[in-house]
Amino acid sequence: MPDKKHFNVVVVGAGPAGANAARHAALGGLSVCLLDRLEAPSHPVRCGEGVGLKGMSLSVAIKPEWILSAIRRVKMISPSGTLVELANIGESYIIDRSIFDSDIVKSAIEAGAEFRNNTNVDAAERLTNGKYACHIGSEKVTADCLVLADGVESRLARDLGWNTRLSPSNMETCAIARVSDPSIAADAIEFHVGNRFAPGGYAWVMPRGEGIANVGLGILGSHSISGGADEFLTAFINHRFPNRTDLTNRNCGGVPVAPWLDPLVRGGVMIVGDAARQVNALNGGGIAYALHAGQLAGEAALLAFVNGKFDETKLSIYQKKWAKGHGKNQRITNDLKNFLITRRDDAFYDRIAESLKKRKALGYLSVFLRTFAGHPVMMWKTMKLFG
Amino acid sequence: MVIVDKSKCDNCGTCVAMCSPAALRLDKAGIAVSEKCVECGACVKICPIGAIRSGIKENHA
């Protein structure tokens, strides 16, 4: 049987955003094709793998088999080394992204989506009949509705009319590795702030279990030099883990830290996930946002097909729902990030760490309120985000 | 045109997002540089592992 060439919906990119969009569109009975350029989507994993229950619960129930460790404490370490420990942090976990991502893809396939891996889309265009074509080598797949979930490296959006170019101050350039070290506690995340380890970003330790963790950092693009992230990571690992027993899985990547892309919909095309900058700009986390956006896009596609006829104007519901949901908080994370980058320095973090180091049962809210003290608008935004 | 060292490049795509004239693209063979490259250097600076270098400097070396 020849491969099917036309679908109601084609989704490019099978990470959490794309796979969840494919799943929701397929659940409603649309013909859906989910494409990924790789053999296994999201491989290698370029992620700390930390998620919060609150953000995730909008879209999925966290499965026990995804969980590597449950987080009870957050250690914030100031530039000069003062430790502030947060115990009141809400339910959060480190999850295995390989298992998690393949489960979301599986759920899309079970819902009826056709999954094609090793499929690189070279270009996308709108045809004169209003449908969309994805060019894959000499082949093409067409669709009434296109979902772009092709990550931070998204190029197809430019083919279809978006200006997706990011400025250096809206991108974190990141390096990541897996470290084995006896000092790693399975229940504690660490955030190391300051220019010494990560200018315009932070270094982090996310435990995958007792004695093993994802370790990484992000540097703001405007503060970066060639190869900077990787060199900073080497320096951080040497400082924090002098007694390490293993260092593997070194990778790098980029995380957009910008307001989400507006518009999210153009004609019959929706854009989701990292490609749409649906990332928490304060901490660089994007899994919960990606799942949520994917679901909203999949549901919007469903609404747009009425009696088999596609009405692209109905896709706007995706942006409306996103803007009212996670989208509102995403904008706040970007405002707070911009303030921190321009108005706070190492000496400031050392001072607040000193003032907070003896406090018990701290939460993110108290720490960030202290960080933005004296700036009512920022404090109000912090309340909205963490309150 | 900038030069991508394929032995170092990790195919993370960070440079593609920064590229102003859309001269970079990530395909199956890795990062491809097209003639639209204006040597602005944004990708060189942003590359997390230093896999991109300026072609101009290369020519003058």
Image (tube, rainbow, N blue to C red):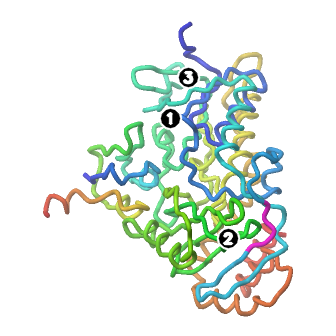
The region drawn magenta spans A70-74
Residue A94 lies, in percent from the top left, at: 72, 57
Q: Is B57 rendered above or below residue A74?
A: above
Where does the C terminus of chain A fall, quadrant-wise?
bottom right
Residue placed at 68% from the left, 22% from the top? A310
Amino acid type, callout 1: Arg
Report, in whole angstroms, how far the alpha carbon at label 1 lies from the one at label 3: 22 Å
**Nearer the N terminus, badge 2 or badge 3?**
3
Residue placed at 68% from the left, 59% from the top? A208
Along the viewing direction, whichever of A145 and A362 lies nearer the viewer: A362
**Nearer the N terminus, badge 1 or badge 3?**
1
Residue A263 lies, in percent from the top left, at: 61, 46
Amino acid type, callout 2: Ile
Badge number at residue A37: 1
Residue A322 lies, in percent from the top left, at: 73, 48
Residue A247 lies, in percent from the top left, at: 52, 63
Chain name for mark 1: A
Residue placed at 56% from the left, 7% from the top? A1
Residue A383, picture quadrant: bottom right
Badge number at residue A184: 2
Amino acid type, callout 3: Lys
Instruction: Give the crowd class for mark 3: few <14, some 14-19, many >=20 residues within 10 Å.
Output: some
Secondary structure under badge 2?
loop
Q: Are marks 2 and 3 in contact (CB under 8 Å)?
A: no
**Nearer the N terminus, badge 2 or badge 1?**
1
Residue matched to label 3? A131
